[in-house]
Every structure is written in C-alpha cells, then in structure tokens.
Amino acid sequence: MSLHKLSLILIGNLLIGSTAIAQSDAYLVQFKDKPTAVSSSEILSKKSIARRTKFEIPLTTEDQPVYAGYKTAIRQIDSTTIRYTLKWHNGLVINASKSAALKIEKLACVHKVSYVGKAKAPITVEKPQFIKPVIKLKESTIRTDNLSPEDYGMTYTQNKQIQITDLHQMGYNGKGVTIAVFDAGFNAIDKIPSFLKHQANGLLTFGFDIAELDNVLNIKDNHGTAVSSCIGSYHKGKFIGGAPMAHLMLFRTEYASTEYPIEELNWCKAAELADSAGVDIISSSLGYNQYDDTSLSYTHKDLDGQTSYASKAARIASQKGIIVLNSAGNSGDNKWRKIGTPSDVASVLTIGAADKNGELGSFSSQGYNSLGDVKPDIVAMGVLASVASPSGSYYQGYGTSYSTPIAAGGLACLVQAYPETHPDAIKHAVRITASQYMTPDSFLGYGIAQLKTAADFLLLKEQGQALPKIISTAQTFINVYTGKATIIEYQVFQHKKFLLLFNTKKKVAEGKNDSNQSFYRIDLSDSPLKCSKRYTIKLRLKSSIDTYTLKKSQLYNCLN
C-alpha cells in the first residue's frame, strides 16, 4: 500500500473525501507498436538531452511518444476520456465504461487493456505548465560551508549521521542539481519560513498534479511538505535541509483515501515528466503492494523489480541516468513486513529508517526483493526525524518517508561534487561505503550511509589513483582505497611504553582478503581502537604487476 491515507469525515449525511466525488473505472490501454518517430528535441528538454549525451545514453523507442493516431481512435469510442499518455508503457490511461473497454480491446492496434481502479474523470486535458513561485527578499543568500551545529537547529543529527554536514563544509549543498519529489500534496510549501529563501533563489517548481490533472500542488496534503523540507529548507538556527540549493520539482501522484494501481501509473507519468524535464534525482516516499480491490494486489514473489507498473518506470528512469530513491515502506512491524514496489528494483536506492544511534526502526520494511537483491540499500534517520509543518513550525516524525529525502539531499551534494560521474558509479560508491557493506542484511541493507566517505572514494577513483590510501578511520573499522590492488594484507599495531621507557608495539589485528572494487573496510570490531592509544597500520596490497606497502602512523585519535 502507499504510505499516505487521509481519514474521511462524516458530517450529517455528507461524506467528505475523494470518495464523495463521482468516480468511474480507469484502464491502461497498451498498444502493439509506435509507427512513427519524432526528433529528440521535440520530446525532451535540453537538460534531458544533455544528461543522455554526457552519460552516452541512446535515444530508444521508449523515449518516443504514443502514436497520435491511436489516441484519435480511442477518443472515438463513446464513454471514454483520456487521462494521459504513458510512452514508457506505450499506452493511455483512460476513464471508460466496461462496454467501452471491451470495444477498445478489440481494436487492431491494441495489445492489452488492464483495469487499474477508479478515479474521477478529468475535466481538463493533460497540460503540465511547470509553474515556479518566486518571491523577493532583502537577503536571500544560502550558504552551508560555515554552519555550526546550532545553525542546523533540529536537523543537525539527521544530517550529521550520514555525513551531510561534512559535505556542506566542503561547499556542497546541491547547487545545480534538480530533484523531483513525488508525493500526495505539498500544502503551503510556498508560504512557510523554511522555503522562503529557496523560492527567492528560484529553486521551487510546481511540476504537475497527475492525480487531479491540474497545476495546483500547494494544497490537498501535508506529507509532501514535510518530505520536501528534509531536502530544500533553509531556516538558519531552526531547520536546514540536506540540499538547500537543489532545485525541487514537485509532482502529486496520490489519492489520499483510495488505493488502486492507477496511483502507480500516476507515479510512472511523473517519472516520464521528470525525465523529460532533465531532473537528476527522483525522491519518492511512496510504495505499493495491497489494493482496495485485492485481486489487483501484489504478493512477495511479485517484488522482482520487473512485475509492477511502477517498477518498470523506475527501472527505465534509472537507465536514463536518473538516480531514483524510494522509501522501503513502513510495514516492518505488520503482517506484510516486506518492502513495496518500486523499491524492489535493483537499480533503485531503497531507503530504510534508523534512529539517531543507527538502530533499525521497528516499522522499517524488510527486504530482499524476490530475486535476492539486497534491499533496503541503505538507511538514514527515520525515527524522530525532524520535518517542517504547513503551519510554519517543525516537528519530529517516524517513517521511511523521511529517511528517503534526507538521503536524497545527501545524494544531491554528491552529484554536485561529481557531475561527470555516472549515476551508477555514485550509487555503487554509496552502497560500498555504508556502515555494514561487508555484511548486508534484509533490515539495514548495506547500513547507514557514509556520504563523506563515498565522496572521498569517488575523488580517488576520478583521479585514477593507483596507489592505496587510507580514506578514514573509526573505532571499529578502517576504510581503505585499494587502487589497482586485488589482494590486501593488513596488520594493525598498538604502541606502548614498557616501564615508561621502552617503545613497544603489539599486533591487535591482521588479515588478508581479495578486493576487486577499489574499496576495502578493515573490520576492527573484535579489537576496537582506543582513543587514548597510538596505532600504526601496515598495508600490503598486491596487483598483477606491483606490490605496495603503506605505513600510517598515529592511525587513530579522538578526532578521527
């Protein structure tokens, strides 16, 4: 099920909520082919084309629009209204009577007609306008490179946990990066203090309300406002998001009081629009598994990253060079327990929830997907995470809905730091540098994200560094960039004074392992380093042609 449901209120004989509005059956009509093609400049923005060019992503038939002649044929069927097109599914989402759906299914051009639930028939045609609310302030500067813990206010802990504060100190704050946020509504987002400077810098765009097919997004639900604040807020001394200089593009895809697969298709449409607009990242705090019509629900075996409508769109978005983050879900302590879709896609960064100490939130949904891919991928703070309210105040909440945008803010900083690095390489770096990447599980995945470590690793990779280097140390591990080496041998020594006169050293850890991904973590959990002591490490790294030996003195102290 999706992560947001609104309660209904009964006043006298009037039922308030979306079910009070007349709804009709909705269908996905998929076609057999795309007879014509148009140039990329007609269907994609310059920013989208630039992303494909930079990462050598070819234009495919998926990028081509649905054939206009097929749309005309569908319109001629009585009792049929077209909601929107889906080029990645080569289809149309329509409202229609059952008899009309049967007629459509018999058309020669139609491959398949699928019932996807109920929705209010649109009163306007599909026409996204991408409205940008802009305000003027006397002072609208956003800087993150000199912030104190007090400047972050309520968000310091959640940003520090995954090393966003370190990236901020390095000057990275999401500038130049566009993030699409999919949610149920963004009530008052353009009015609250945390987004005033964001708007003054022209960094907020209302993408499209795909659920209602209009351009009004700053009403209807509070959840998207809270989610977005984890990324784009800048209210110094009160609340600072992970990427306050990132451009946020908002899309509403959810119906609050019903649950049908059409919401998945709304998600798919948002992904297509986001891709065409040229976004770099999608942050989605949504997920699907169980529907009001149980015959449409998924089972655990369907979580293969390929079965659901949303999984197909998320997979294609990833192939187009977009980093997709999706919440694992909040079903860890109920009967379902598992992640939803599209969190089951291998190329999606699925985000679980932890508390400030790195312990799993009991509600955080569990993996793996049905093919055995590690899920969730990483976790961030989703237990008592701080978020903004449409009232202008701030509060703490629970959910992978919040850990996901917190992580998305950090990813935006990484993309800013390494704009020429392929998104797959960035995701790989995030996974392998997380806190438990050597022993992933179905609860925390690869563990707490360590984004400064990921940034350091990417820098060494980008420089083509051949020699090994210690990236960082902590009490229970040492992160090593192994360069071209394929075998690593290590010894860690603790230095002591014998009778306060003679220098001695004691071996406290040693090991040998293969390393084929330029990164290795030496596990010291059995012999943790002590703040008051001095250590050295001897690394011996071998490749097919060379052997390197690296000695590091004063390996660990209280400042590491």
Image: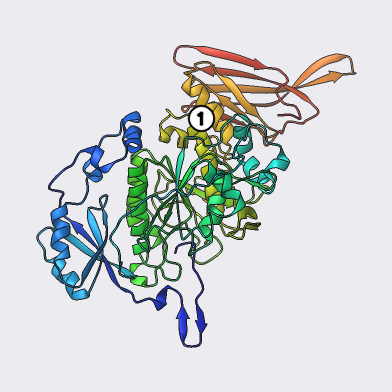
Which amino acid type corresponds to the residue marked 1 in the rendered image?
Answer: Ala
* Residue 94 seen from this side: yes
Quarter of the figure with residue 265:
bottom left
Using the rendered view, name the quadrant where residue 74 is placed: bottom left
Q: Residue furthest left?
A: 108
Q: Looking at this view, name the residue that lies furthest to the bottom.
A: 12
Percent x, y for residue 19? 41, 76
Q: Position of residue 196 (x, y in %)?
A: 57, 48
* Quadrant where the image shows the N terminus: bottom left
Q: For the residue labelled by badge 1, is the local secondary structure a helix, a strand or a loop?
A: helix
Q: How many marks?
A: 1
Q: Position of residue 35 (x, y in %)?
A: 12, 48
Depth order, front residue of 413/545: 413
The relative height of residue 457 versus residue 270 in the rendered view (above or below) is above
Around disc 1, counting alpha carbons within 10 Å, would you say few (fewer than 14), some (14 to 19), or many (20 or more)?
Answer: many
Residue sitting at 49 percent across and 45 percent down? 377
- Please tell me whether residue 391 is drawn above or below residue 312 in the rendered image: below
Left or right position of 281 against 161: left
Residue 446 seen in the figure: no
Q: Give the colouring mode of the picture.
A: rainbow
Percent coordinates x, y for residue 179 in the rendering: 46, 44
Out of 355 and 323, give the one closest to the viewer: 323
Q: Left or right of 183: which side holds 307? A: left
Q: Quadrant of residue 447?
A: top right
Q: Where is mark 1, residue-wise?
A: 417
Q: Which of these two is toward me, 219 or 242?
A: 219
169 relative to 265 in the view: left or right: right
